[in-house]
Amino acid sequence: MKNGSIKNIRKEVLSDQWYTLNRYTYDYHKEDGSWETQQRESYDRGNGASILLYNTEKKTVILTRQFRMPTYVNQNTTGMMIEVCAGVLDDMDPVSCIQKEVEEETGFRVKEVQKIYEAYMSPGAVTEIMHFFIAAYDDSMKIGAGGGVEDETENIEVLEMPMTDALKMIQDGMIKDAKTIMLLQYAAVQKLL
């Protein structure tokens, strides 16, 4: 067997509230050929999709601001985060999910989205794969106020800002969300704006 093979996997559900926290106990095959019993916890929140909306004419992007409790308990004194639009896939395909999320969160209806990549966001603890998209927008696509879905307790502020301001907010530490940083940097490298 190669290093990294595992066997005798046992799963224990520790919590099944908002999402599912499992503890896995397994035997791991080490490089020296021996086996070692290991234990890890894994948080399963499902896979997600995120998108950067950009306007080439105005050189702007659409971002959101909302409260995130995990950041509040880890040194974010307000708990507010500036992010790209995103959501959990649930039972939807990534494209349908992100189109729905864009409409709910930002009030824009985008018909054409471009997938640019996918990535594990925190592979040491979370099972989630994030699907990353970009889409051009213009004012004619605005069909509502956005702000999220009330029954999902979303209170989302929609932000339209120049791309240059968004990039500066990364440097200033005002944007600390990984998916947002990844998409803004992708747009900068690709010279979308």
Image (spheres, rainbow, N blue to C red):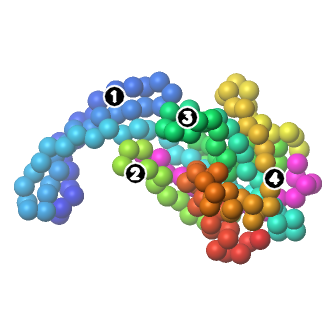
Mark 2–mark 3 CB contact (< 8 Å)? no
Q: Check if mark 3's residue and mark 4's residue have beta carbons within 8 Å.
A: no
Residue beneath label 1, please?
13
Q: Residue at the spot x=85%, y=39% of the render?
A: 145
- Is the C terminus in the top left, top right, bottom left or bottom right quadrant? bottom right
Say whether marks 4 and 1 touch (CB < 8 Å). Answer: no
User: Do we see residue 2 in this rendering?
Assistant: yes
Q: What amino acid type should be assigned to the residue bearing mark 2?
A: Pro
Under circle 2, the secondary element is: loop
Give the mark nearer the N terminus: 2 vs 3: 3
The verdict on residue 114 being magenta is no
Give the spatial CA distance, label 4 vs label 1.
41 Å
Q: Is residue 16 left or right of residue 84?
A: left
Q: Choose mark 4 or mark 1, whichever is in front.
A: 4
Disc 1 from disc 3: Cα separation:
26 Å
Residue on which disc 3 sits:
72
Q: What mark, if any, has residue 70 been given in the picture?
A: none
Range drawn in magenta:
127-142
Q: CA distance from mark 2 to mark 1?
A: 19 Å
* Mark drawn on residue 160: 4
Q: Position of residue 166 (x, y in %)?
A: 71, 59
Sequence order check, earlier mark of 1 and 3 = 1
- Tell me the residue at 55%/34% (across/down): 72
Vertical comparison of 31 with 22: above or below: below
Q: Closer to the camera: disc 1 or disc 3?
A: 3
Q: Which residue type does callout 3 highlight?
A: Tyr
User: Where, by quadrant of the figure, is residue 29 drawn?
Assistant: bottom left
Question: Which residue type does callout 1 highlight?
Answer: Val
